[in-house]
């Protein structure tokens, strides 16, 4: 939780609640760190008691928080979070989403370019509207890698990596290379459309994680774990994947 979010969506026992009030979101952020008294909320938020009181009443009516009494002093009250943050909008991703919308509207896009822009528009549109697609994208990527794995011919790691490099380059998904350090590292330069991404402080290529993971695991009958540690989304000029066997 943080102040860079415009809207946050919470799940409660009564349903889904969307909030965009900075004061309410600040209160929920404070409560996410643990139970907090009224006076502590006033002090940490920097708002007047009357303001915090009004927002607490609203949050309680929305079933986002609960008010409780201290066992040793019924006159003193504290508040606890009664909800879970499900999603939040992020302005940098909304800007990126709008850029893809602009690109997809260009009439001279050819078929392959249109499909590529369609994928990225949907992917970043989902995140721009507040839903984190990374876990699901990795699962789907793993399913794809498992399904296309039988099309690879080699039955050893070195051979599969050579085929993977050729596959990645052939489909213009970036220039893949492999280096061996303390661990096996896969690098992708000119990653498809990632070089235009702003630095967002997080990795973005979860579907590539899944595809590589699915291909290696299905071909070699081992449980591989692929983790992206560098990305254009983290301010780097390439994508870096660490390969490990679980």
Image: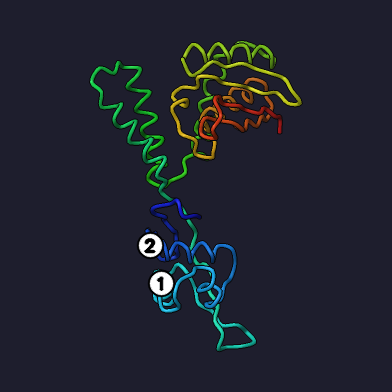
Q: State which quadrant residue 58 falls in.
A: bottom left
**How are the colours assigned in the image?**
rainbow
* Residue 59 at x, y percent in the picture: 42, 70
Q: Would residue 146 be visible to someone looking at this image?
A: no
In the rendered structure, the answer to whether residue 176 lies left or right of residue 122 reads right
* Residue 245 at x, y percent in the picture: 71, 30
Category of crowding for the residue at label 1, using alpha-carbon neighbours closer than 10 angstroms: few (below 14), some (14–19), many (at least 20) = some
Q: Residue at x 56, y 82 (%)?
A: 69
Label ID, residue 65 = none
Nearest the camera: 66 or 189? 189
Q: Secondary structure at mark 2?
A: loop
* Residue 173 at x, y percent in the picture: 48, 19
Quadrant that contains the C terminus? top right
Proximity of marks 1 and 2: CB atoms separated by less than 8 Å: yes
In the rendered structure, the answer to whether residue 136 lies left or right of residue 89 reads right
Q: Would residue 24 be visible to someone looking at this image?
A: yes
Task: Identify whether 36 is placed above or below 16.
Answer: below
Task: Identify whether 217 is placed above or below 172.
Answer: below
Q: Which residue is mark 1?
A: 55
* Residue 106 at x, y percent in the picture: 25, 23
Distance from the alpha carbon under mark 1 to that under mark 2: 9 Å
Q: Which residue is mark 2?
A: 21
Which residue is situated farthest in the left direction here? 107
Q: Secondary structure at mark 1?
A: helix
Task: Identify whether 157 is placed above or below 199.
Answer: above
Nearest the camera: 206 or 157? 206
Q: Earlier in the sequence, mark 1 or mark 2?
A: 2
Category of crowding for the residue at label 2, using alpha-carbon neighbours closer than 10 angstroms: few (below 14), some (14–19), many (at least 20) = few
């Amino acid at each position: 939780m943080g102040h860079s979010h415009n809207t946050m969506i919470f799940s409660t026992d009564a349903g889904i609640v969307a909030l965009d009030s900075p004061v309410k979101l600040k209160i929920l952020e404070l409560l996410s760190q643990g139970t907090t008294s009224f006076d502590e909320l006033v002090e940490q938020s920097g708002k007047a008691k009357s303001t915090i009181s009004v927002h607490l009443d609203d949050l309680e009516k929305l079933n986002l928080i609960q008010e409780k009494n201290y066992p040793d002093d019924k006159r003193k009250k504290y508040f606890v979070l009664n909800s879970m943050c499900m999603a939040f909008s992020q302005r940098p991703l909304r800007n990126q989403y709008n850029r893809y919308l602009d690109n997809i509207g260009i009439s001279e896009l050819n078929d392959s370019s249109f499909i590529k822009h369609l994928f990225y528009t949907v992917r970043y549109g989902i995140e721009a509207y507040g839903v984190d697609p990374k876990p699901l994208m990795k699962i789907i990527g793993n399913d794809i890698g498992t399904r296309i794995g039988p099309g690879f011919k080699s039955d050893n790691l070195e051979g599969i990596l050579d085929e993977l490099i050729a596959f990645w380059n052939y489909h213009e998904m970036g220039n893949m290379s492999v280096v061996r350090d303390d661990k096996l590292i896969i690098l992708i330069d000119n990653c498809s459309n990632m070089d235009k991404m702003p630095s967002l402080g997080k990795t973005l290529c979860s579907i590539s994680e899944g595809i590589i993971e699915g291909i290696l695991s299905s071909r070699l009958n081992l449980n591989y774990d692929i983790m992206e540690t560098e990305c254009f989304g983290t301010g780097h000029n390439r994508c870096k994947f660490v390969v490990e066997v679980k």
